[in-house]
Amino acid sequence: MSLKSPVDGPRTERRSLSRRLGRTLSRLLGGLRNLLLRHAEAGLAFAVRVASAVLAFGLQVMLARSLDGADYGTFITVTTWILVLAGVVVLGFGESALRFIPRYVARHRWRHARAFMVTGLRWVLMASFATGVVLLVSSYAAASPTALIVLMIALGLPFAVLSFFFEGVGRAMGWYACAIVPTYIVQPVVVIVVCGVVLLTTDTLTLRTALIVFIAAVTATSALKYLVVFRPALAKTSNSADSLETQTAGPVAPGYRALWLRASLPLMAVYGIDEVLFYSDILLVGVMSESENVGIYMAAVRCLAIANFIHYAFMLVAARKFSIAASSRNQERLQSEVAEVSRMTFLLTVAAVAITLAAAPFLLQLFGPTFVAAWPVMIVLGLGMIVRSTVGQAFDLLAVTGHPRAIVAISFGCLLTNIFLSALFIPWFGIVGAATATAIAMSVRAAGLAMAASHHLGVQVVAFAPVATRE
């Protein structure tokens, strides 16, 4: 009979626990590897956005050190308004492209895909230039320096709108690199190079010069997307439509154009409100605080850009996959796609937020000593991003499956929540109050999207939550 030492029992238990933890970690890493392979397009999008984050970060550091605090805040205000208004004036065609084009291509209805692109371009051109003219006229009636702000927005808006539309077409066609590289790589490179040359030759960079360079870069980006996305998309659908092997549909009925407009306009409200919600904290800080605080708050947002780009990377590719899965009427396939995207979005966001917060003091110091005050803002916003990531891409899931009213109600409610809490918190807590209001609004939005997806689609969108099936 062998005698066991009293310490053998605890030692054996520790070894057993260590083996179980090792097997669990191995399964998690294996699952993560498989998910990364399945979502290679999202990896590409994320790589582009990481490179873009580095470029945008360098650009913001250069501008923050070259312009005074008020001018830098004004630059952020103008560029933010251009992006917000472009998300509205595109009339929803950039998003409805993800609903219609993948289905038409999958069913070889090439004439319909081409007609949708042409119809969308016509409406977007009319809306963007009409809005630009209204703003241009308004700039003459506005008092300085507001006149300069309105004028710059009017000049940049039409080209930003076209860029949004062409990006939507590129995503719908599955051409992710062509859709995003012009905006997120070429555009900041152009601004950095031109502003750098101005600084080297004149040793001074003014607000007006910086804004003109930015608008010129947006214009060049829009033209590049036309050449590498929109024109090839038209050519592909035209050639396929003329091919005898794939010609399975007749001419496009006139009623389709009205259908596309009716389907797009609700998405204008959906994504327009969501765009305002996304930038509302920056805009509210600009309204309720000094211009210098806008720059400090923006520094925190820029430092968290990589974590935010994870969400964007999966948004870029998920909508098309959701649209195709939904059109197949296969509930299990749709649930599987949603679950994988939610898990990947959550895990990578947590990792990115943790790494960014650890490096925050160093990153903020690059902007200047006064910008270190943005670290508490980063902590609060980072927590909000993690909560938002728990539901993955539920927003785009509801959009491409035809539930815009639910999204509008959720986004509008969150926008009102953010405005109310910002008005309450900013006077007391400054930019930390703005971040707190935004984080709470993110949490409310995540809960609303999860409930809407479960109610309308019977799909569980929360990462790692048990899948709820419909009876």
Image: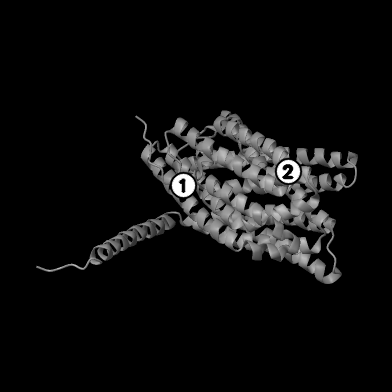
Question: Quadrant of residue 295 in the image?
Answer: bottom right
Residue 409 in the image, given as x and y percentages of width and height = 59, 31
Residue most toward the bottom?
200
Can residue 35 be seen here?
yes
Which of the colour schemes (rainbow, by chain, secondary structure, one colour) is used? one colour
Q: Nearer the viewer, mark 2 or mark 1?
A: 2
- Which element type, helix, strand or loop, lies under badge 1? helix
Indicate left or right for 330 with 95 as reference.
left
Residue most toward the front?
6
Q: Quadrant of the N terminus?
A: bottom left
Question: Quadrant of residue 147 in the image?
Answer: top right
Q: Amino acid at mark 2?
A: Trp
| Label 1, residues with CA under 10 Å away: few <14, some 14-19, many ≥20 | many
> Which residue is label 2 attached to?
428
- Whether 440 is drawn above or below 219: the answer is above
> Which residue is label 1 attached to?
342
Residue 27 in the image, given as x and y percentages of width and height = 34, 58
